[in-house]
Image (cartoon, coloured by chain):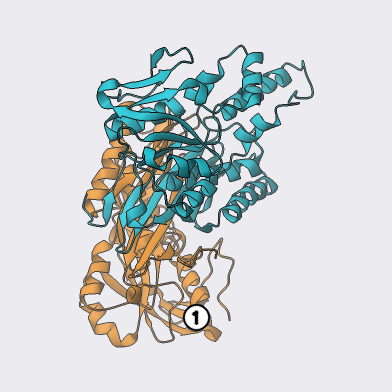
Chain colours: A orange, B cyan
Amino acid sequence: MRNPSTAMGAGDDAAVIDVGSKYMLFSSDMLLEGINFDLVYFPLKHLGYKAVVIGINDILAMNGIPEQLTVCIGVSAKLSVEDLDELYAGIRSACEDYDIDLVGGDTTASVNGLAISISVVGSVDKDKIVYRKGAKTNDIVCITGDLGAAYMGLHLLEREKRAFAGNNSPQPQFGGYEYLLRRQLKPTAPIDVIMSLREAGVVPTSMIDLSDGLASDMLQICHSSGCGVRLYMERIPIARETHQMAEELHADPVVAALNGGDDHELLFTVPVTLQSKIAGIGGIDIIGHITPASTGAKLIAPDGGEISLTAPGFHHEATE
Amino acid sequence: MRNPSTAMGAGDDAAVIDVGSKYMLFSSDMLLEGINFDLVYFPLKHLGYKAVVIGINDILAMNGIPEQLTVCIGVSAKLSVEDLDELYAGIRSACEDYDIDLVGGDTTASVNGLAISISVVGSVDKDKIVYRKGAKTNDIVCITGDLGAAYMGLHLLEREKRAFAGNNSPQPQFGGYEYLLRRQLKPTAPIDVIMSLREAGVVPTSMIDLSDGLASDMLQICHSSGCGVRLYMERIPIARETHQMAEELHADPVVAALNGGDDHELLFTVPVTLQSKIAGIGGIDIIGHITPASTGAKLIAPDGGEISLTAPGFHHEATE
């Protein structure tokens, strides 16, 4: 690193900048039409909100509080001024909900669909920063929210898009699955959990934003921390609607939780001695514990069988 | 503003974050294929370099030093792995030249052409920060580099692209115009001027990154500072090659300097008492002086005639 203020560069959820009294956190994401979202079913207001949530979760995952945000938007001619207003309304709504100042960025024309780039700056006390690398043997593995619902929501939206295109069903069939749609279209950032951990005096030993699916993100922590893990399948929080939708699609809800992604929750570890404090905070599930690297990263089935945790696209296998 | 650390949000070249001992500066830009660049003639390595220059100039324009940078890239399938390597080589080369740490961002697929988003963080001592708003009557107006060359370079590239498409000329005719091409394809950031001003103990009263053309950017300073200006046409630095190319195209080189844009130089004001210090620093031209708002923003022709400074797209007329 060329600048002494660069405490840590790439390789975690956000970069860490030493400003003397505390650490600043800095992270950027880009969302592109046709890759990260489909405007056929993604309302622009929700898209703006979700872009902010994705951005600030990188700061939360370092145990920081997001404070400032820039948004750059490339807008194609097919979007009207009102469409753009909707997008910004969603961005502003998220900034209000999470107490963030929108401090810059710009809007330019695009010949090629909508492009959104979000950069977020936040801060954290130096003794409270959490990296991916601090998990220790016997730490408990904790998770906020439930998993797989956003992925099932995406499947549902894609199914209705196909049905609509074939004119089989002029009205989309979403009844009973509002929760799945909400998890896909309007995720919220688990900032309240970060606040509750602070109040309880708990500093996690490691943490990561759950965006690629539990398997991949857990393996990231194992790789960075040089540890193994045992996750208990029946403890993974999966919503009733996710189970229901999985049944309808003849899919496995655990696979959706492990590899679906887009959950935007937090996965973290804390010393086992703090288990009762964690139990006292709502919205956190304990799904396993950290083991030595030599025992590998394992998923434990209800019958006690062990499955090695793998993730498509994750190339650093946990050291075994 | 919701966060006390937000010293200034949107409205200048970069946002200002109060971190106690100093100010952090934070700015983001997005460049889109087909809008901001044309890959037919823009080498990817140069594009990566230019993207960094555009990003860090926003920090320089606040009298700050850029320190950290994130880059998000959306890559379409038509680009090879080698192409992407070239782009990153340009980004890394600029980071080396300007002592910046590349600390994050990501590369994602794009269905719609290349998209580049650059966010830069820098810092400045609190008593040295420069906004657009501090110009005072009688301050001298200073400029780095020369103007209009990048715009002429763009015209040259577009002309050769058309000629090539019509097969009139299999080899592009760039002879003698290498300077114009360099100003368009590989601009440099005037960081040495910022360093020289620091060494000379000069803190400008106002400053802006010259990206939209002298007219528009000068009007921005007048609007923010509540002042007028007199710019002397014959003092505007215009390179010999720019004059030559303008003649060839039957265009006015002063118009290219005023409205061409893409110069990536700095426009700033300093008290007239510091004029000799400015003269001692190389690469700076004095092109006019600040007047009361009541006298308007004027361009003075060599014959003494006054022309009101206007810019397409600039909606805040200087108060008259």
Question: What percent of the width, then of the height, locates residue A77?
Answer: 43, 25
User: What's the chain of the residue with tag 1?
Assistant: A
Local SS, label 1:
strand
Q: Quadrant of the C terminus of chain B?
A: top left
What amino acid is found at the position of numbered circle 1 in the picture? Gly
Q: Is residue B238 left or right of residue B57?
A: right
Q: Looking at the image, is B32 positioned above or below residue B100?
A: above
Q: Is residue B41 left or right of residue B284?
A: right
Question: What percent of the width, then of the height, locates residue A4?
Answer: 48, 67
Q: Which residue is rendered at x = 24% and y = 55% of the image?
A: A98
The residue at which mark 1 appears reads as A228
Observer able to see residue A85: no
Q: Which residue is rendered at x = 59% and y = 28% of the image?
A: B149
How many numbered badges does the structure rendering display? 1
Nearer to me, A137 or A116? A116
Question: What percent of the width, then of the height, locates residue B233?
Answer: 48, 21
Q: Looking at the image, is A232 positioned above or below residue A123?
A: below
Observer able to see residue B144: yes
Q: Which residue is rendered at x = 26% and y = 78% of the image?
A: A278
Question: What percent of the width, then of the height, locates residue B137?
Answer: 30, 32
Q: Residues within 10 Å of mark 1 (few under 14, many from 20)?
A: many
Q: Residue B49's quadrant in the figure?
A: top right
Nearer to me, B295 or A99? B295
Q: Which residue in the rendered view is the most extreme toward the right? A: B170
Q: Is residue A108 left or right of residue B226?
A: right
Nearer to me, B229 or B179? B229
